Every structure is written in C-alpha cells, then in structure tokens.
Image (cartoon, coloured by chain):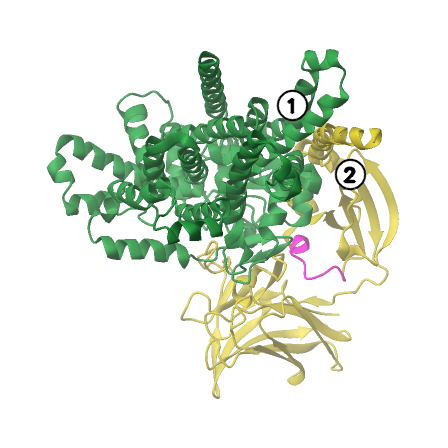
Amino acid sequence: MAVKALAWLLVPALGLAELGGHFYFSTRAPGLDEWRAVTPTVRKLRTRDELVVVAPDWAEPNARYAFGDELMPLSAVARADESTFPRAIEVSILSASAPELRGFKIVSEARSGKFRLRVLENPAPAKVLYDFVEHVRDAKVAELRGGAETPCPLNAHAHPTAGGLHGDPAFPALRHECGGADSHFVGVTVVEDENWRGRRCLWAMPVPGATLAVRFDAVPLGKTIRGYGTLPQWTERELRGAPVEVTVLVAGSPVGTYVHRDGDGWKRFEFPVAAPSPSDVEFRISSPRGGRDRQFCFQADSR
Amino acid sequence: MKRADARSSALDALIAFALGAVYVVLLLSTVKNLGYARDEGFYFRASTNYKHWFDLLLKAPAQALQQDAVDRYWRDNHEHPAFVKSLFALSYKFLAVDHPVFKEAGTAFRFPGMLLSALGVSTTYLWGRRAISRLAGFVAALLLAMQPAIFYHSHLACFDVAVLSMWLVTTYAYVRSLDGGGLPWALLTGVLYGFELDTKHNAWLLPPALVLHFLVTRGVPRIRRDLRAGRTALPLALLTMATIGPVVFYVGWPWIWFDTGRRLVEYVSFHVNHDYYNMEFLGVTYFRPPMPRLYAWVMTLATVPTITIVLFGLGLARSALELPFGKRARQATASERKTRAEAFSNRTLWALCLFTSYAPWLSPMTPIFGGTKHWITAYPFLCLFAGTGFDWVLGKIAALASERLRARRVPELALTLSVLAAPTVMTLHAHPWGLSAYVPLVGGTPGGASLGLNRSFWGYTTGAVQDFVNAHAPKNANVYVHDTALDSWYRFVHDGRLRADLNGTLALSGSDVGLYHHEQHMAKVEHELWVDYGTVAPATVGENDGVPIVWVFIRPGRGVAMPPRP
C-alpha cells in the first residue's frame, strides 16, 4: 500500500527527469565552434585525400561549414559511392557510425571533445582508370535521329541556370548543347537520389525520337565499365515516366544495356569489358518517350 | 457567501488576465529574432490591402461597400476568411501607420495573434478553474503556453493559435450557456462561433463535437422521450451557432458579400481538395496519399513535453474512473452526483473536442504538410485533462505529506514546479527554433534529426541568420531567399531587420548570397547551390542544439569580412 502510494511521486520525478533529459540532449551534439575547433585535427588526419564522412549524416552541413571544400570537395560529398576511396575519415558525433563505411577496417580511433575520429581503410578499393564525369570536356556528344547525326557542340561559357525547388537542377556553364530546350545538353550537375542525397553525374536527357550519344576517345580500360544512373527524385518518385536505356559500346561494340525505370533510384550498372585498352567508349541514351521528364543523369568510370 | 464568491471570481479574472498579459509580454520580448514565416508574408500583403479598404471605409463608406472596391481589396488571399487578417490590418493601421507604437510593422501585424494566444491561455485557466481547481487551471494554462510549437505559433501573424483560441472560447461559452448561463452566454456562443468560422476552417469540426456532447450527456433515451413529448432539449447555444454564427461569418468577410454562393463553394473546395505538400516523417518525405496513420500521434509525443502527456493520460484515467455510471455512482449523494455529472459533461466535451481535432488524421487521405499545427485546436483540451491529472496526483501526494507541509502548501508548490519546470525551460530554450524542437523522449532536437522528423518549414529561420547576412553580404547583393516568401523578405527589409540594399530574389543563379532552409525534399535546392556557387561549404549555419536548420552560402569571392577557416 505504501509503495503504491509512493508511486505517485513518480510524476514529479518524471517532470524533473525530463528537465534533466533536456539539458543532456540539448548539449550533447557539438555546436559550430566545436566543429571549427576539431578542424585542425581532422586536417592532420587527412594525409592522402581520404574521404571525410560525417555520422550521423544530418550533421554534415556543420562539417562542410567548418572543414570547407578543401577537406570535403564536391566530388567527394556528391560521390557515386565509396568503392574507389582507399581510406576514409569518419567524423562521428553522438556515437553514430556511417553505414556507408560498413566493411571498412578501422585503422585508428581517437576522441576529440564530442567527436570520435576514426580512420578507416577500404579492404578492396577500386582503381579508377578513367572517370567519365571528370572528362566531360573531352566527350563528343551527338543526337542520332534516323540515320542522321547532329553534333552537340561544347560551350564552355553557357549561361548557368538553376530552377529552384520546382524547376530544373543547376545547369553548368560547360555543356555540350544539343539545341532546342535549355535542358538538352550533356554536362555535369548534381541531382538528388531516392534518399535525397546529392549525386554528381552527367546530365544526359534523351529527347523524343532520338538517341543521345556521348563518346569518349581512347579511354584506358580495365575489366569493367561501371556506373550509376538516376533521375532526380522529384521526377522519379512520380513513377509515371518511360524507362531510360543506356547502351554502352566499347570500340563500337555493345557491352551491355542498362535500363532505368522510375523508382529504381541511384542504380548501379557494371559491364565486363574485353576490348583492348585504350578504346573508344560510347554511351547511347534513349527513351521510348523521351522528353522533359526524362531527366536522366549518370556516373560511370572504367576500372 | 456571495461576497466571497465575488471575491473569488475577481481573483480568477485577475489571474486569467495576468496569465494572458505576461504571455503577451513574453511574446513581444522574444519576437525580435523570430523570422517572418512564409505564410506570414502572404498575410502581411493581404492585410495591407485590407487596411487600405478600411481606410476607404472610413473616408468613403458608400464607395467601400461597392463590389468593385470590395473585390479589389479583399481578393488577395481569399482562400482564408477575414477575421484575423482584419485584426492584423487594423493593428497595422493603428499601431504602426497612424501611431507608431511598434517600431517594426511586422510586430504590429503579429500583435493580434499574440493577444489571441493570450486569450487561449487565459480561457484555459478559467475553464480549468471552474472544472477542476484554481491551481489545476493555472497549471493547465501554463502547460498550454509552454510548448515549443505553441510558443512559436503564438508569435505569428497566422491563424493557427487564433483558431485554437476561438475554438476554445466558443466551447467555453457553450459550456457556460449550459451551466446556468442562459441567453447571454448562448448568444455569445453564436457570435464567437461566427468569428471562429471567420478565423479558419478548423471551425467546421466543432459542431459535430458539440452535437455528440449533447447526445452523450443528455442520453439518447431522454432525447427520444423529449421528442415524443413534442419538445427538444436542444441547447440554445447550438441554435445560436447555427443562426448567428453564419451571419457573423458573412458580415465579417467582405469577399463573400457578392457572388456569395460561388465564392463559398470555392472556399470550401480549396480546403477539401488541398494540395499535398511535402512533409518528412521518420526519414520519408510524403507527398501524396496514403499518408502515415501514425503521424499525428508520433508527432504529438515527439513535440509536446512528456510530463504534459503523462498528466494528460492520468487525467483521462481519472475521468474514466469517475464516470457517473455504475454502482458507485448510484450510491453517491445527490450533491456528489451533481458534481460528477458536471465533471462528466466537461470532460466529455474536452474529449470530443480533442478527438474531433485529431479525427481528420485518422484518414490516410488527409495532408500532413503543416505538422502539429493541423490539430492545434486539441491542445487546450489535452492540457485541461493534464490539469485534471495534476489535481489527482496532487491529492495523492498531499495525502503522503505531513500536516505541517500541507499547511505550508509544500506539496502544491513542489508538484507545480516539478511539472512546469521542463516545459518552461524547453520552450524558452527552443526559441527561435520552435518548429525544430523535439522533446527528450525522442532525444531532443538531435534525436528528432536522427529519427528523420521534419526540421522546420515556412522558411522562417531567415530571422536566425539575419545578422550574419547583414554583416557579410556584399553591397547591393542579390540574396536567394529560398523558402522565405518574397513578401516576408520585404517585411524584413522594411522593418530594418535586413539591410535596405539587399535584394531578395527567387533566382538562384546569379545570386550572391543563397539561403537554404532545410527540409528533406528541399535538398535539391542545396545541390543547385553547390553547382551554381561552386562550393559545398556554407558560410554559416543556423543550428539548434547542434542540428543544422538553415544555412547560408556566399558565392566565393563575394562575401564581406568572412571569417577565415581554422
């Protein structure tokens, strides 16, 4: 009976516990000054262009603010995946771990204030021989319609645009312009995947009745051509577009066709390559109903 | 005895007034760094138009009442009725333009919203005082005021806390009309309901709650008997709501004076066919039905202080134990039966108001884009139940205390402080990040971010980075405003909160400074900033408890006096 009566005291105890919980949780994650303070330590750890990953991912803007582009360049932040990075630095708060580094081996671990800093090693990093996104300037782009081929000339000084929330993604100054609508070009941008993560990729939107051909000459080849494709999540989530097909040709012969359907998200493709290195590589992108909502964007490399 | 009653009533009125007044002072003292929300911008613009109509009405009434004048001034934002926006307009006119009481016109627009918030707090006290006890009413009122989301919305020139208060005062007047208040309270109920209708469409949900209350408290058998005897015991207030209410609604909204039928259909249609905007919940952005059925319940648990929820649960439990049915009820004295019946009537009404406020979110077809404000009208009733729970706990704890402690009111003081401390501290700490605040139950704001709960909406957090923008934007900079409506941006500028030379723009490309208000589905905008600005590094981040909420990009080479990176 006495215990039962005393149980009522749990109510004020809970009120005070919630107050204590508030003080605990509100001071647990580091603020901007603490992110700035840890920067020199992270910089010291980064000896070989390691990938810097933040856990949990929602804290990444604080890291980008403090570390800057030097430690977190766009190509790494909006990477296709982690497979090519030999090492990574995981900057962790709240005891979180980065799921994308699962499988990496821990080389070192240190604490600095509210941060846990781990250097991790990729047990099997892929060696990229040629990154097609990085070589966009070297590409030759054309539209194939019937038997005719219309070149899409390179313009390094196009007027950059960005459509905001409901418009097109950012269109860069350097583009292979296919004429017609602004969006008919091949160039590097960043689009959001199915998890709203930014992915740096080659914008290559197929137009109705035509195939977009993106060619690279004398590409150093390894065992495969590997990549990812997606449409911006804003478009893809509608699940009402036609599939987009990408046929990869090496030295003029097809090595595989990737089909991207709405809902696939950031989807990987990988085709084995037997041709001698170097060889010409061509991506042919088409859609039975190409057009405004087929905002295809892909990343690829030879490895 | 009568004198004692009068003294007690006067004291209660004084406490109610003091609670409201202190709340308004608190809101005014914290308004400075709260940015103008997206929707406020639309209401500022509309209210400015309405103010011009009021000017015309004073100058040339006959002209003002003509359809062309009405349409010209009242067309703007006619998807929402006019009562609260008219208050914004009049406050702007009298407290900013005619007499500059407020330095910032934005505060003048917001002031009526603050007063209505205070009305909600005061009415919660008065109802709690009548139905439970003075202390329980006081606690219920503060549990309402001290919720981060309520505190945030209470600052705004918007309709959410306004409709909370209008629903509450209408219901309170309704109860008073049943409780011997007679014709005056019944008439007042009708008038108040008209204003509620003229505040926001949540008002449509109130009549079903009141009718159900009548059916439950009167009892279907008695209603049948009444009908057989050729009479209805229908509360007079229901009739006034059905008659006076629509008249007040009509008179108070000039837009529907002409072409009434078509405009009313358009109004209703807008809200029953509302767009499904995006909203993140547990890491997933929902943008079309089916919406998650757990949304309302999880968000309530994650944002309302847990002690308030626990007291609410205890209040519900006590109410269930004290139902006026069964053996114990039959054995009660007449006076006890009357007390129980009154308590049952109040609690039934609270439960029905609470349920009807949440009911639309039982359907997966109902949009969820507005977060917890959708069912905000439930919160006073949740807090009145919490007051009931508080009173119950107090009785039990007081029984454990010695007579000496009881005589010194130690149990009252200790319990009150222990249940109000966390909500008060959390609410004041959350400012100006009210929509980003989550309770310790889910790990606070960092826990909310880890769970994938929405971090903010309406782009109001520009206010939190205004000083940085003023200090670092280049002269005559184009500032991409992102989710801050341009009308809200201009209000910042006109009020001197942002530099006059800064040009707000929706054109990201070519801008010098880019704001980014984080919502999951907005990530696209940040990616555009990365590409267009050529950097992924924000120049600053506005964060709440370490969680980034809003960040600012400055095009490399354009920032002024930028702090060096470490």
**Rendered position, A280 above or below B550:** below
Q: Which residue is mark 1?
A: B416
**Quadrant of residue A216 within the rendered picture:** bottom right
Q: Residue at x 68, y 11 (%)?
A: B408
Q: Of the residues tagged 2 and 1, which is closer to the observer? A: 1
Residue type at tag 2: Phe
Q: Which residue is depicted at the point 33% across and 33% down? A: B183
Q: Is residue A122 left or right of residue B440?
A: right
Display colour for chain B? green
Q: Which residue position holds label 2? A: A115
Report which colour depicts chain A.
Answer: yellow
Q: Nearer the viewer, residue B139 or B529?
A: B139
Mark 1 is surrounded, within 10 Å at the Cα level, by few (under 14), some (14 to 19) or many (20 or more) other residues, namely: some
User: Counting other residues with Cα less than 10 Å from the Cα at mark 2, is it few (<14), some (14-19), or many (20 or more)?
Assistant: many
Q: CA distance from mark 2 to mark 1?
A: 38 Å
**Image quarter (top left, top right, bottom left or bottom right) of the C terminus of chain A:** bottom right
Magenta range: A75-83
